[in-house]
Structures are given as structure tokens and as C-alpha cells.
Image (cartoon, grey):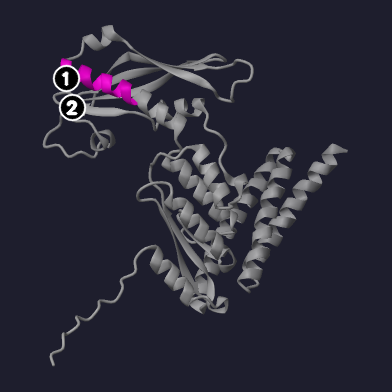
């Protein structure tokens, strides 16, 4: 009697969310879990503010952290501002535009004359904001500049009618056909594309939340969970284990932002090395905040700016509350931070006392 050999089954390979869930299950005993290291990446998609508000409701997230409605005037300011639409290209090849040429990092075998199309402010009043599209030409030696100061005009027309939304208005982009006609044909095409890009970018920002805004939403929510910034520049946070379910929900939310957007919460075991890393991160951040607060209090005292006392006290209270909370969660006295708090409290008390005596 013959038997058929059964090929061995390959072990299941877990990736992404499956790894997260599997690891969390293995750390289900909360006595073994300190919290989570949170990292996230958010990319541009097509998420409207209404989409975001609806997802917050569906996922039972705190709707107070939904950003305010988009304002057309903000879209205009962004698109035509210093970090807005801007195009740099070599004069002998106007079609060679893009991030490399814009940033000046494009490698060239030899020096060449370049032109940059940028937007510059002209005037603003209660009814309009006017900005001109300027063409700046830099010679081969990078020593001389010349300008065409009005290749086009970008105007934001404020909607001041009764009942209009805050920051409402419309954009018009008017090419200066006479000035553009003097340019070589290939460059004319680049100019017109830049003017179209201004309008396209404005429409996009009036409709969709940019990746920057969505990142801000995630950052604010994570920080709302009393997160500790592990990396000084941000982007990596520690969140205590009590917020594990909220982090799972945030992961689902970020996954809806679009392709590539994700949030990862890596479980941290409750070990001395991990606890020390988190405590050091908190005390470093608290020290920086208290050092800056002390300098600001001293400046207010020196300048007799007693009106600043309330805001300074609010900042002090925030650090004090965070210290109390994390001292309890991390089972650590955070003595160094408390000592620094006491010094700033004395300094702040002097400012408040001076402000009170001036009011009498």
C-alpha cells in the first residue's frame, strides 16, 4: 500500500498589523507591559475635513481634537507664501523643473544661467490680498540678478458678505500676456504651467487636508494621551499602557488617510532599561521647558511685563501636572524635575507678587 508524502507546511508569516496584534497578545499581562513606543508616517491623500469628522465619530475618538474647517484664505497664504509654489529651471532647458532644480541640489557639469518663478506680496486690505508672480534670472557666475516683476497677478478676493464663513473668498490668477510673450516659447510653457499649478494647489488645499495637517492631527492626539517625546525632534513618542486601546483605534484612523500612511505602536516590556529611557526622555524635556520658562519669567520681570504672568503660570502648571502624572505612571519620584519646578515656582511667585502690588 503506497502512501503519498505531504509537503511540510510553511509557518505563517505575520506582517504589519498582525505582528502588532500578536505581540500585544503576548504582552497581555499588563504587569509585563510598560507602554508603547509610537511612530507614524502620513502622506498626502484625499481626506476632507468632513471625512475626518465622520471617522472620529465612527471610531469613538474625541471629536474635540478634530481640526477646525479649512479656510480659503489659509490655502491662498500657503500656496503663494515662502513655501508655496515655486519653480526653478535652467534658461537653456526650461522644461527641466522639479524638486532637484528648486532646491538647488541638482548636479550640473558647468555653471548655467537659471530662472526662478516665485510669488511676492504686493498689498493687502480688507477686501483683497494681491501678490505678483516674479521671474528672477541669475547669471552663470551667480553674481547678478534681474527681474520681471509681474509675470502674473494672484488676487484673493475676500468674501465679506453677511453669513460667509471665516476666511472665505476666491482666487484669481491673471497672466501678464504681454510680459510672457517676450519670453522664449519653451519658457512660456513653463510659466503657464506654474500659474496652473498655483490654481490646482489652491483648489486642493481648499478641499483636502494636507499631509502636514493630518500629521498635526495625529501628533495632537498622541500628545493628548500624555505622551512623552522620546526623540527631541518629535515623531517618536512613549504612551503608557492604559491607552493601548486608543492607540489601536488611532492606527485604524491613520490607515484610512491613504496609501502609505500608518501608525505603529511597539509594546515596551516593563524592564529597568526601558523605564530609565522613558524617565530620561521626560526629565530632559521638562528641564528644557523649565529652563525656557525661567528665562521668560526673568525677561518679564526685567521688562515689567506683568501681564505675561498668567500665561507663564499656565505653562508652569502644565509641566507640574505632567510631572505628577508621569511620576505616578512610571512609579518614579522624578526628584530632579521636582527640584527644578520648585526653583521656577519661587521665581514665578516673585513675578506674581510684583504684578499684584502694581494693581493696588
Measured from the top left, where is residue 6 in percent x and y? Answer: 20, 82
Q: Residue at x 78, y 47 (%)?
A: 352
Q: Residue at x 64, y 16 (%)?
A: 162
Measured from the top left, where is residue 36 in percent x and y? Answer: 50, 66
Q: Is residue 180 rendered to the left or right of residue 223?
A: left
User: How packed is label 2: few (under 14 Cα within 10 Å), some, or many (20 or more)?
Assistant: some
Residue 186: image tag = 1
The extreme front residue here reads: 1
Q: Is residue 22 rendered to the left or right of residue 186?
A: right
Quadrant location of the N terminus in the rendered image? bottom left
Q: Residue at x 52, y 57 (%)?
A: 249
Residue 279, picture quadrant: bottom right
SS at circle 2: loop
Q: Which residue lies under the disc numbered 2?
A: 95
Q: Nearer the viewer, residue 98 or 306?
A: 98
- Relative to 258, residue 17 above or below: below
- Relative to 99, residue 42 above or below: below
Measured from the top left, where is residue 239 in percent x and y? Answer: 54, 63
Is 187 magenta? The answer is: yes
Q: Nearer the viewer, residue 31 or 78?
A: 31
Bounds of the magenta span?
185-197
The extreme right residue here reads: 360
- Residues at marks 2 and 1 touching, judged by CB atoms closer than 8 Å: yes
How many numbered marks have been drawn onto this rendered protein structure? 2
> In terms of sequence position, does the residue under pointer 2 or pointer 1 come before the other?
2
**Secondary structure, magenta segment, majority class:** helix
Measured from the top left, where is residue 138 in percent x and y? Answer: 23, 24
Quadrant location of the C terminus in the rendered image? top right
Residue 93, picture quadrant: top left
SS at circle 1: helix
Q: Residue at x 32, y 28 (%)?
A: 86
Residue 161, picture quadrant: top right
Amino acid at each position: 500500500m503506497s502512501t503519498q508524502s505531504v509537503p511540510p507546511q510553511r509557518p505563517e508569516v505575520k506582517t504589519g498589523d498582525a505582528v502588532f496584534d500578536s505581540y500585544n497578545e503576548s504582552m497581555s499581562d499588563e504587569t509585563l507591559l510598560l507602554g508603547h513606543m509610537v511612530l507614524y508616517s502620513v502622506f498626502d491623500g484625499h481626506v476632507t475635513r468632513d471625512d475626518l469628522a465622520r471617522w472620529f465619530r465612527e471610531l469613538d475618538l474625541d471629536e474635540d481634537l478634530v481640526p477646525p474647517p479649512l479656510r480659503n484664505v489659509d490655502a491662498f497664504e500657503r500656496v503663494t507664501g515662502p513655501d508655496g509654489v515655486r519653480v526653478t529651471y535652467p534658461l537653456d532647458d526650461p522644461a527641466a523643473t522639479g524638486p532637484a532644480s528648486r532646491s538647488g541640489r541638482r548636479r550640473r557639469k558647468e555653471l548655467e544661467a537659471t530662472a526662478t518663478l516665485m510669488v511676492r506680496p504686493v498689498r493687502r486690505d480688507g477686501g483683497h490680498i494681491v501678490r505678483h508672480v516674479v521671474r528672477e534670472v541669475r547669471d552663470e557666475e551667480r553674481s547678478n540678478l534681474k527681474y520681471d516683476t509681474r509675470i502674473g497677478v494672484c488676487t484673493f478676493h475676500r468674501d465679506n458678505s453677511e453669513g460667509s464663513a471665516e476666511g472665505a473668498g476666491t482666487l484669481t490668477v491673471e497672466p501678464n500676456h504681454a510680459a510672457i510673450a517676450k519670453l522664449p516659447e519653451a519658457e512660456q510653457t513653463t510659466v503657464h504651467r506654474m500659474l496652473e499649478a498655483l490654481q490646482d494647489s489652491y483648489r486642493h488645499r481648499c478641499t483636502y487636508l494636507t499631509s502636514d495637517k493630518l500629521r498635526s492631527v495625529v501628533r495632537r492626539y498622541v500628545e493628548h494621551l500624555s505622551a512623552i517625546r522620546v526623540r527631541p525632534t518629535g515623531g517618536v513618542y512613549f504612551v503608557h499602557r492604559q491607552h493601548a486601546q486608543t492607540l489601536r483605534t488611532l492606527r485604524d484612523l491613520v490607515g484610512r488617510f491613504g496609501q502609505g500612511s500608518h501608525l505603529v505602536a511597539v509594546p515596551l516590556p516593563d524592564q529597568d532599561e526601558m523605564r530609565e529611557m522613558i524617565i530620561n526622555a521626560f526629565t530632559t524635556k521638562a528641564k528644557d521647558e523649565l529652563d525656557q520658562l525661567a528665562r521668560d519669567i526673568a525677561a518679564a520681570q526685567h521688562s515689567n511685563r506683568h501681564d505675561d504672568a498668567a500665561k507663564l503660570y499656565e505653562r508652569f502648571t502644565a509641566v507640574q501636572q505632567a510631572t505628577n502624572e508621569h511620576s505616578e505612571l512610571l512609579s518614579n519620584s522624578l526628584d530632579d524635575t521636582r527640584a527644578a519646578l520648585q526653583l521656577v515656582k519661587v521665581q514665578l511667585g516673585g513675578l506674581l507678587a510684583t504684578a499684584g502690588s502694581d494693581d493696588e
